[in-house]
Image (cartoon, rainbow, N blue to C red):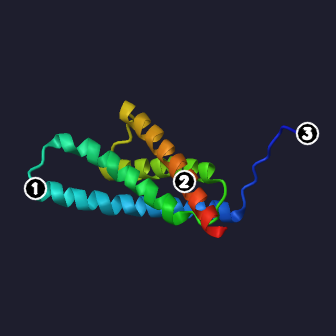
Amino acid sequence: MDMKMKLRLKKSDLTDVVKSVLIAVITCLVLVLAFAMIMKFAELPDSVILPVNIMIKCISVVTGVLFGIKAAEHGALKGFLTGLLFVIVTYLLFSIINGDFSLSLMSLVDIAIMIVQGVVTGVIVVNIKSRKAE
């Protein structure tokens, strides 16, 4: 018995990942804009910014994976790729907007959280979709 497993991604798998990332990025932009409006009109302390930003990113990755994955296979890998690419795209996007490309410890924490969020959501979504197909 050959213990070597080959993972073969199909075009539809890559399409799922691209859709997931796009949905996640758009969701993030909408939520960040909404939060910025709330911050402008409500007198919230600056201490709420970091936790709300993390929640916005988590919600965005979950939304992206939930609505982007169509094929009920490779959930962990699709979630991993979605989380990773989401972090890269949003980092570049917000760095361009802010004019600051510096990385911090929080950037590394962000990467870890979004990848874990993507993997967990990917596994859950694929299991739900595969049960619906039965």
Q: What residue type is disc 2 on?
A: Ile
Question: Reading the chain from its start, which is encountered first: label 2 or label 3?
Answer: 3
Q: Quadrant of residue 133?
A: bottom right
Q: Residue at x 59, y 64 (%)?
A: 129
Q: Residue furthest top?
A: 105
Q: Is residue 3 left or right of residue 21?
A: right
Type of amino acid at the residue the image marks with label 1: Ala
User: Which mark is on residue 1?
Assistant: 3
x then y, percent, for residue 124: 54, 54
* N-terminal label among 3 and 1: 3
Please identify, in this view, whether the residue under mark 2 or under mark 1 is nearer the observer. 2
Sequence-wise, the earlier of marks 2 and 1 is 1
Residue position for label 2? 124
Residue at 50% across, 66% down: 67
Residue, far right: 1
Distance from disc 3 to disc 1, alpha carbons, whole Å, reads 64 Å
Q: Report whether 35 appears left or right of 85.
A: left
Q: Which mark is residue 42?
A: 1
Q: Can residue 108 be seen from the camera position used here?
A: yes
